[in-house]
Amino acid sequence: MLPRTEINQKLQSTDFDLIVIGGGITGCGVARDAARRGLRVALLEAKDFAYGTSSRSSKLIHGGLRYLDQKQLGLVFEAVNERRTLQRVAPHLVNAQGFLFPVYRHSPLGLCYLKLGLWVYEALVFFRVPKLHTSYNAKKTLALEPYLASDGLSGSPLYWDCTTDDARLTLETALDAHQAGAVLGTYRKVVGFVRAENGNLEGVEIQDKHTGEKFVVRGRCVVNATGPWSDRTRALFGMQGQILRPTKGIHVVVDSKRLPLRYAVVLHHPDDGRILFAVPWGDRTYVGTTDTDYQGDPADVAATRDDVEYLLRSCERFFPDAQLGEEDIIATWAGLRPLVAADSQNASDVSREHRIVVEPEGLVTIAGGKLTTYRRMSAEVVDACGDILKARGVSGFSKDSGTQHSPLPGAVGWSKKDDHQSMAQKALTASKGAIELDTAQYLVDQYGARGVDFAEWVTADSEASQRLIPGRPEVLGVVDWAVREEFAASLSDVMIRRTQLFFKEKNQGLDVAERVAKRMAALLGWSPERVMSELDEYRDEVALSRKWRTN
Ligand code: FAD
């Protein structure tokens, strides 16, 4: 990665075709698509890639089964096609996952209705599903998931969808944009717009959090991909009114020993019948989500006690023997759905579709969308920029970015024959004994085929192969990798979005934070004061995620 000052120089000295504001999945997708079409692209992110909603989702690349119930067939097809594309271009990050849908005597949807619905769904999408569904009677269901409530259980269909690591999907999209020539700047917040006398956009003014510099980045067209911040960004541009109605969703994480699951389980919440998921996540299980209106600053979004109790009530109903309580919760995360505003009383009814708003002065806002369809939505956004670009003399860029066929960086070298186990064996062999199998598995699960490169590299640095925490697979070298290969620029980037220790480690990584900060300091030349402030910021992030315990 280039040093910060050099990136700033590039940002100041280049006349960009397209400036993308926001480094969530949408902004990174737009930057990737545009750079692959041959446009000169800058992406500016106020914090880290996936700092916002894109690291706080339910982590599902879903085939839109629920849209069938709403008779929105267009959304079903789009989701199914994109799921297949993402499985192809990111096989290391988009993994098939079985979803067990237990049906009880008083469930809102009967067993026959669900089975029929699944047949209709699979036939409609020409059986383009990770695996065909099956169905189990009550006895077999309980044999598969012994923690499920048995009282009144009729049976359970098992259907297949996909899960992902949302922050890594975003990061790999950013890395590919970078490889295609986009200039990426994290911790560079857009604080204003620059206009010509006729009102047309000429660029944006940004502030670099780490150097304090303020400067102008010039570009012909600007994409506002700031998710839940979209209306605030439009207000900076002078636009009034709201195009978003954000709703909040939270998840809780527990030890998988407290709620061991073979499959993800679909739950109907006992209070309101909303659908929730309990999802196995390696040595953890997460449960979510909620759906409530939210009006505050997106940066302050956090789980409340009410949110947590709501999720625990569904666990109590469906997994009574687990007896999950507040003390079992290792971590929480809270995110805002950047939903397009609609006249609706009920937050769950607000449309999940996206909307592209083009201002003739050169600002294109993308609102809404979801992780699953980000690639296709990004292409639409770049298409929408086309007229503005042409009007400003930019021509010769390609109509198609080819992202539907281009593997993300971790999928390069991951052949059709490969799977997570075989790749872990390759990484183990490449490491020549420097790491153990659990670490090799972790590396390929995280980095895909690049995990094998990591394992090779670690042979030359014995300190890098030391475990960060006894019993956990992460090694010290992941810190170096995050800084050198993955744009990590703050302690929270490494702890939350590159390693996920924030969610997965029992004390949310607080016990190892100083060691990580010092390693980063050695790599990035941080002063002791900077180390202290990084630690403080990380502790603040942890405190925000635990706020529900005290209010
Ligand atoms: P964000 O990820 O929020 O990115 C916006 C970025 O803009 C942020 O990083 C922010 O720092 C940056 N920014 C803001 N202001 C500025 C500025 N002035 N200058 C520079 N940068 C700025 N979708 C699915 O497909 N599957 C799911 O399972 C799923 N589950 C979900 C569960 C929940 C609880 C939620 C909330 C959403 C879920 N979604 C899911 C939807 C999906 O996560 C979002 O649609 C998607 O992540 C939005 O990405 P984004 O890039 O638009 O916004």
Image (cartoon, grey):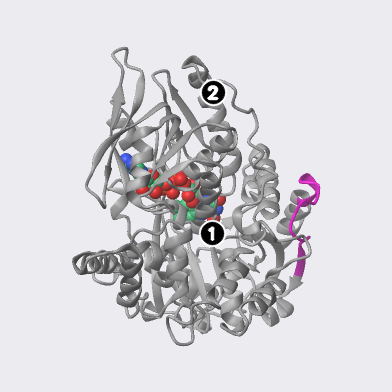
Label 1 vs 2, first from the N-terminus: 1
Cα separation, mark 1 vs mark 2, equals 32 Å
Instruction: Pick out the residue farthest to the front.
Output: 460
Q: Is residue 275 visible?
A: no
Where is residue 530 shown, x and y percent of the image? 22, 64
Amino acid type, label 2: Gly
Main SS class of the magenta portion in the image: loop
What residue sits right under mark 2 in the picture?
386
Q: In the rendered structure, which segment of residues is drawn in magenta?
A: 122-135
Residue with the mark numbered 1: 59
Q: Is residue 259 visible?
A: yes
Residue at the (50%, 63%) spot, across then down: 269
Residue pictured at 56% horizontal, 82% vertical: 435
Horizontal side, residue 188 vs residue 162: left or right: left
Q: Is residue 452 magenta?
A: no
**In this picture, is 213 found above or below 388?**
below
* Residue drawn at (57%, 57%) of the image: 60
Within 10 Å of the Cα at label 1, are there few (<14), some (14-19), or many (20+) other Cα atoms?
some
Secondary structure of the residue carrying tag 2 is helix
Q: From the viewer's side, name the closer residue of 475 and 110.
A: 475
Q: Quadrant of the C terminus?
A: bottom left
Quadrant where the N terminus sits is: bottom left
216, above or below 140, in the image: above
Q: Residue 69 placed where, x, y %? A: 64, 47
Can you tell me whether the CB of the residue at mark 1 lies under 8 Å from the nearest atom of ligand 1? yes
